[in-house]
Image (spheres, rainbow, N blue to C red):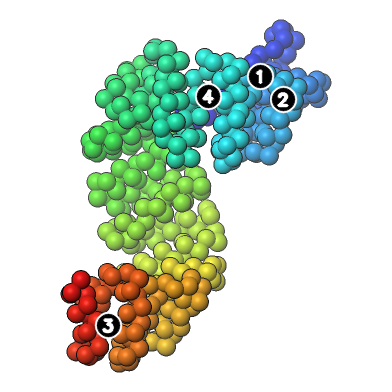
Amino acid sequence: MDKDFEFFLEEKGPEDKFEKLRAAHLALHRGNFQEVLELAQEALEDNPMDLDSLNLAAVAAYNLNDNSMASALFQKALLFDPENAGTHHNYGVLLERAGNLEKAVEHFLRCTELQPDFPESFIHIGNVLDALKREEEAGDYYRKALQRLPENQENYFQRGYLLNRLGDYDKALTSFQTALKTFPNDAASHNGLGYVLSAMDRNREALACFEKAVELAPKDATYYFNLGLSYLRLGQYEEAEKSFAKSIEFSPGLVDAVFDNIRLMIERGPHESLLELLDKAEEVNPGRHDTLLYRGIIFLESGKLPEALKALDESLVRNPESIQTLNIKGNVLKELRKLEDALACFDMMLKKAGDLPLAHYGRATVLALQGNAHDAVKALSEASSRDQHFLDQAWEDPAFDAIRQNPTFLQLIRIRNAT
């Protein structure tokens, strides 16, 4: 289970009557969620309304990534016992993971109403509000959680987490260091310490923490992702790409977060390992158009124009509406001197996206390469009237060399100089 939170179960009834439930609780402690589910379902056959069995089965289903079953079980448990704080919290965690953030907050808030000393729900409310870009409100809930969290050895990890979210890095650092004195092999605390050190620009120390977290929990996707970010900050791009590949291998949902950093890797990293990263992304999350788009960009950067064109064409099959892909394809065709085809790409951008300055500029470059000064200047004027920086770009762009001495082009450039 995630270190950020734990599921909370309320035991009901004398222990000697519930052999299966005792075994299920032990299996839960061991992390054997399939066994928990089977034992809880057996108990439910005898007593379909037993809340502890319902909660155990729901928690097991959640950890087995069966969100549909978990949701149905939590709803059933709340139908039988709408005042159960732990069930509201657990259901909120499920809704948060499913992206139903507003509904998740409702259940976390209900948990805090029923049990005001429940710091974990306050933490999750803060996390959800932060995800909704309501940072000030999120901070209020983090502070409420901190007030309810006793300062003891068991809670130093959570205190460090909260202090980090509040930007109190010095105290967060102390909390994680204290947690590691008690639990030196706790991967989550090493990861938390690395996160704080990164925020303090102590990147070498942070890297060592993330490496330790990965060593202790070699199948945790988040730790690999944070390790990848740490390598990026230190300019170790090949290592970053390999760490990101590991992160999406264990959690395909991290592809978007990895792709947020891919431009930097394309510009500075080795392309061989980056292509391997994209292969892994396609393997775990097939059918995305941007996987092929980035392959096309890499091939373009490497001067492999036919390979770039092939990847971009395949990307457009997956998403014909991608303006970014059309623009890059137009530029690849321009480099290949397939000027009519390039012009068609930029025309398609205008058709799909309306009066787009980038498309007008692309048309201007192609028309200039064709020696059509009149139409090139007209298209450049359309682009620059919407975004003045395109005149600066044109002044440096070799595509305009053939018309650079044309009087209308020079007149347009004078407008740039005058402003």
C-alpha separation, residue under disc 3 versus residue under disc 2: 68 Å
Q: Are marks 1 and 3 in contact (CB under 8 Å)?
A: no
Q: Nearer the viewer, residue 213 or 94?
A: 94
Instruction: Residue 119: give x, y in percent of width and height.
Output: 49, 20
Residue at horizontal 46 percent and vertical 76 percent from the top:
350
Q: Which residue is mark 1?
A: 84
Residue at horizontal 32 percent and vertical 69 percent from the top:
387
Q: Earlier in the sequence, mark 3 or mark 2?
A: 2
Q: Is residue 115 above or below residue 250?
A: above
Q: Earlier in the sequence, mark 2 or mark 4?
A: 2
Horizontal side of residue 205 vs 32, given as left or right: left
The answer to whether residue 240 of the structure is visible from this angle is yes
Residue at horizontal 29 percent and vertical 28 percent from the top:
169
C-alpha separation, residue under disc 1 versus residue under disc 3: 69 Å
Q: Which residue is mark 3?
A: 399
Dot label at residue 121: 4
Q: Residue furthest right?
A: 46
Q: Which residue is mark 2?
A: 77
Q: Earlier in the sequence, mark 1 or mark 4?
A: 1
Corner quadrant of residue 30: top right
Instruction: Residue 32: give x, y in percent of width and height.
Output: 60, 28
Corner quadrant of residue 202: top left
Q: Which amino acid type is shown beneath numbered disc 4?
A: Ser
**3 vs 2, front mark:** 3
Instruction: Residue 239: give x, y in percent of width and height.
Output: 31, 49
Q: Earlier in the sequence, mark 4 or mark 3?
A: 4
10 Å neighbourhood of mark 3: few (<14), some, or many (≥20)? some
